[in-house]
Amino acid sequence: MRGWLTALAAAALLAAGTAKTAAAQVRGAGVPILMYHRVDGLVPRDAVGRSLTLEPAKFEASLAWLRQHGLHTLTTVELVEALKRSEHPASAVVLSFDDGYEDAFTTVLPLLKRYGARASFYVSADLIGTPRHLTWRELRAMRDEGMEIGCHGSRHLDLTVISRTQKRYEIGHCAAALARYVGVPRTYAYAAGRYDAAAMEIVRASGFEAALTERAGTVTSVSDPLELPRRRVDRDSSIAAFAELVSGK
């Protein structure tokens, strides 16, 4: 695996150029929020599970690329706070993970610590403690390591096809559960990237400062804090493609 990692890192250097060039591209394009789901050596057989699962060696290669190019990681909250202060973080990227799978603790967290990186993890309250998902104890341990724990709904439902009462439960119950067991969540990620005006109204009323969509793009301001864009990291993408995602291409 180490040999592969070295080869991937070398390919990234060749494809993306020098650290100075990569950092300049990030500054000019805003801050990318990258979207992941699972990082696991055991890849599910179903098409959806497979598409959402990244090999650990490939994820580590991306962390190595970031470090080699002098790029640092922020949580979503830190990015929002900086932009509210009219600061525009340079050479920065946000790593976000949806769904609260247990590999976030067993695989992702150790790799983040190894590379001095941090991330934002979005969990669904009613799935915590169920098979293959994180526990409250693991979430508290991740919080204590500097990771952000945010909301991803209570049952991971599409907010655009449920009633207003159900929307309130999806959003409000998740916020209350995290506040009780981990700490008050400050940002939200819409399940499957689906939301509407009523959902945004409830997210705002529930005290969230920002929310993540699955719209492509980079974050340059908080003029629309409840519709921040993200860029999906494809499991089949090369390290050169990852470099392009980060550099804003």
Image (tube, rainbow, N blue to C red):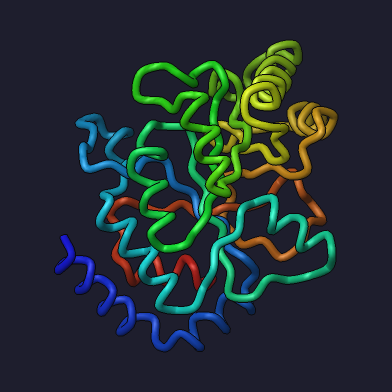
| Residue 85 sits in quarter | bottom right
Left or right of 117? Residue 8 is: left
**Residue 40 horizontal/vertical position (percent):** 28, 41
Residue depicted at 26% across the width and 49% down the height:
55
Q: Looking at the image, which is closer to me, 138 or 196?
A: 138
Tag count in the figure?
A: 0
Point out the image quarter for the N terminus: bottom left
Q: Looking at the image, which is closer to me, 23 or 215?
A: 23
Residue depicted at 23% across the width and 67% down the height:
5
Q: Looking at the image, which is closer to me, 160 or 124?
A: 124
Q: Looking at the image, which is closer to me, 109 or 210?
A: 109
In the displayed structure, 107 sits above or below 176; it is below
**Residue 76 horizontal/vertical position (percent):** 64, 51
| Residue 148 sits in quarter | top right
**Residue 224 horizontal/vertical position (percent):** 78, 51
Left or right of 43? Residue 168 is: right
Residue depicted at 55% across the width and 25% down the height:
124
